[in-house]
Amino acid sequence: MTAGDNDIEQAAVVLRDGGLVAFPTETVYGLGADAENPAAVGRIFQAKGRPPTHPLIVHLAGLEQLEDWVKEVPATAWQLAERFWPGPLTLVLQRGPRVPLEATGGLETVAIRVPDHPVALELLSAFGGGVAAPSANRFGSVSPTTAEHVRAELGDAVDFILDGGACQVGVESTIVDVVGDRPSVLRPGGVTREDLEEALGHHLDVPATSRVRVPGQHPSHYAPRAQVVLVEPDQVAAEADLARQSGRRVGVLLPASLAGPVDAYAVIAVPDSMPAYARGLYGFLRELDGRGCDLIIASLPVEQGLGLAIANRLRRAAGPR
Ligand code: AMP
Ligand code: MG
């Protein structure tokens, strides 16, 4: 299951040759290319069908490389990087000359993180440079949390797939902009707002989910094939019943605490624990698609801890297409 030394070496060679490597991280699988090679970076956009204005995240092997990739490192960036790297936190900083504009969607800022996964870290160390990577899925669709998801969705468009098992966090990194005077959260993710606030010692604003703050933050994203409809937790069963009667193939993400009789084509009881729910979320959406559901009924968890990131992804999965 887990990639061996030989696989890591081969994957590093693919990166050096300008190819694409899908690799596991603790959040989701990434689709990586040499961040300093504009042609290789261009292939990522092609493989994903992603508009070239949507910036990528540059992955590094360690905190000590940060200064090589940015113009300057503000005190807040050091503070957060030291506390949360390796980990599911991405920092947006001013772009250094090593970062081509192709990787930043033309922006003068660059998003950087050190992932917390042994295979990702071994790959980054073996390669030596930065690896630009978004999630390894077609643009707008559900992120992959296993190597099998990547194979099924991108297949031949990827030169090498490293298998590191199922991702432990399951939702993407938290993105924090540390360019201005006050850090701001651009996307909630694997590091919770509560943990960030504790590290910073002050309150943080998290933008409304629906607002398009930065490129790549479209209202519809993380979307399965099936239409997603969000209802109040106590309405899940009634809504599912109504939709089923009108002839829809209904899939339900049922909060475990409400588990009762629900008449639907497919029912997945989601875990009460937010880390467990986050780990399973994209797999659940893929499973309901795979079973042929045309409608998924779900409710939002309480927006605390990882519940904030889960609610963000569900809202956007339900967003206008
Ligand atoms: P993905 O996780 O596949 O959506 O890819 C990377 C994410 O990082 C996207 O949501 C981008 O919007 C975000 N991102 C990358 N670079 C920047 C940047 N310079 N400023 C703001 N967000 C960024
Ligand atoms: Mg993505």
Image (cartoon, helix red, strand yellow):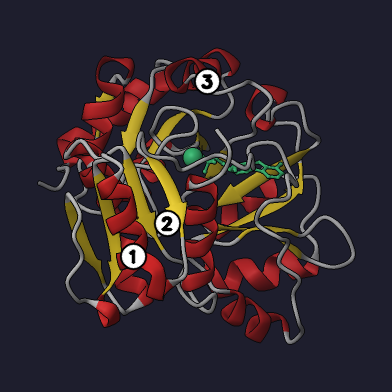
Residue 171's tag is 2
Q: Residue at x 25, y 40 (%)?
A: 293
Q: Quadrant of the C terminus?
A: top right
Q: Which residue is mark 1?
A: 238
Residues marked 2 and 3 touching at CB (< 8 Å)? no
Q: Secondary structure at mark 3?
A: helix
Taking depth in this image into account, of 122 and 272 the one nearest to the observer is 272
Which of the two discs, 2 and 1, labels the residue nearer the N terminus?
A: 2
> Height in image: 233 above or below 268?
below
Q: Quadrant of residue 96?
A: top right
Q: Is residue 87 among the parts visible in the rendering?
A: no
Which of the two discs, 1 and 3, labels the residue nearer the N terminus?
A: 3
Taking depth in this image into account, of 95 and 258 the one nearest to the observer is 258
Q: Quadrant of residue 247?
A: top left
Question: Residue type at mark 1?
Answer: Ala
Question: Does residue 191 appear left or right of residue 149 in this picture?
Answer: right
Taking depth in this image into account, of 103 and 174 the one nearest to the observer is 174
Task: Report the mark closest to the observer, 1 or 3.
Answer: 1
Q: Secondary structure at mark 2?
A: loop
Question: Residue type at mark 2?
Answer: Val
**How many marks overall?**
3
Q: Quadrant of ligand 1?
A: top right
Residue with the most extreme left position: 1
Q: Residue at x 50, y 63 (%)?
A: 311
Residue 274's tag is none
Q: Secondary structure at mark 1?
A: helix
Residue 315's x, y, as percent?
A: 53, 54
Residue with the most extreme front position: 245
Residue 45's tag is 3
